[in-house]
Amino acid sequence: MKRDEEIKALLTFIQETHAPVIQYDEKRIQSDFQKNDNKLSFPLKLLSIIGGYLATSLFVGFIVAFQILYQSDIALMVFGGFFILASIWILRLSNIIFLETVCVCTFLIGCVMLGYGYINAELGVNQVSILFLLIAIASIIISKHYILSFLGLLIIYGSILTLILYNELFTGVLIYTSVLGLMLYFYLTNEAKIIKRFKIFTYIYNPIRTGLILSFVSNLAILCLRGMLDIPVDYVWISSLINISLITIFLLKIYKTLQVTEMKSKIFLSIFSLLILLPTVTFPGISGAILIILLCFFVKYKTGFVLGVLAFLYFVSQFYYDLDLTLLNKSILLFLSGILFLTLYYFTNKTLAKHEKI
């Protein structure tokens, strides 16, 4: 096979150049590559999950139709807990695609049943949120499964957000958003270090990355929806300031990577970036989306880059319509922003072309 020949050629090259240092198990490497080849892409997994969800829903519908579960909250909790534990255990042991999709759907249905049973038993939203937080953490650590890790992170995000909103700690949304931004920056810029230090991330790094981006965008959307939460406008700039600070730190990292040594170029590009971001200081969604775009472009993560662009377009349009300005003033603001972007593009290209010649 072509893949086997490519692997052998690469291993031979490594052995010849680092013979005294590098040691490897060729059979194990071939086996791991074979497993990756057998894995479906994310869209196909999603379609498989939809099919598994329908099949599993029919099973649960059959049980509900005969009123086996809804007569007792305890039965709901017991069956829900059983579905969750069984799905995590099977996913840890099995690599069969159809079985994986059914188990993921069973996990979700188990979560719904467990949550419904606890709420009916009047155990409180805080207790249920903490329970799901613990379940999600355990599912990520134990299963090491792609989709389940992705769903687990979203459940963790939702559980923490529910605790904040239910207890009306609305300013905590600002802190939560800032923490998510910092986590995303650290996570994407330290991939090799994280995987090297924590072996579990060799299995779950990608789904956690996608989940972090979606969680960050969701919190930015909540902040930018005027009137949705009782958050004073005077405090919203804190999230924007952290996003802009992270962008500035990241630009310094890019300067080093591109070997931009001239202080004038660094100062000019940094000032231009701040001028572009300054009008959005009360609207953290735009600076957050730009941060996602820059990070994902730097690490060559296409899915995250697309999510960042979509978020940027949404937040810019929302920012435009939320401005308490006349149509003429809005047009002038967009015109000036366009000039700033074009000027930044021109000088960036000029700087890069100069370094390419060198």
Image: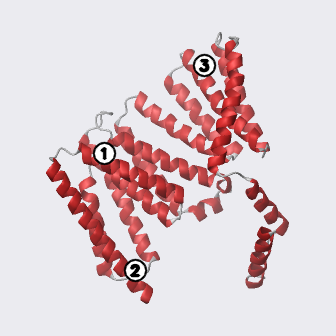
What residue is shown at x 50% (from left), y 36% (from top)?
Answer: 158
Is residue 168 shown above or below 37? Answer: above
Task: Tell me if I can see residue 91 in this picture.
Answer: no
**Amino acid at pointer 1:** Gln
Query: Toward which corner of the image does residue 265 lie, by quadrant?
Result: bottom left
Q: Earlier in the sequence, mark 1 or mark 2?
A: 1
Report helix, strand or loop for mark 3.
Answer: helix
Disc 1 from disc 3: Cα separation: 39 Å
Of badges 3 and 2, nearer the viewer stands 2
| Quadrant placement of the C terminus | bottom left
* Of the pair 350 and 210, the residue shown nearer to us: 350
Q: Earlier in the sequence, mark 3 or mark 2?
A: 3
**Amino acid at pointer 3:** Gly
* Horizontal arrangement in the rendering, residue 316 relative to residue 253 (left or right): left
Disc 1 from disc 2: Cα separation: 33 Å
Residue 31: percent from left, percent from top: 81, 61
* Horizontal arrangement in the rendering, residue 54 relative to residue 165 (left or right): right
Residue 228: percent from left, percent from top: 32, 33
Is residue 249 shown above or below 110? Answer: below
Q: Are marks 3 and 2 in contact (CB under 8 Å)?
A: no
Q: Which residue is mark 1?
A: 318
Q: Which residue is mark 2?
A: 352
Q: Are marks 1 and 2 in contact (CB under 8 Å)?
A: no
Q: Earlier in the sequence, mark 1 or mark 3?
A: 3
Is residue 271 shown above or below 121? Answer: below
Local packing at callout 1 (Cα closer than 10 Å; few below 14, some 14-19, many 20+) is: some
Report helix, strand or loop for mark 1.
Answer: helix
| Quadrant placement of the N terminus | bottom right
**Amino acid at pointer 2:** Leu
Q: Are marks 1 and 3 in contact (CB under 8 Å)?
A: no
Q: Which residue is mark 3?
A: 117
What residue is shown at x 65% (from left), y 11% (from top)?
Answer: 72
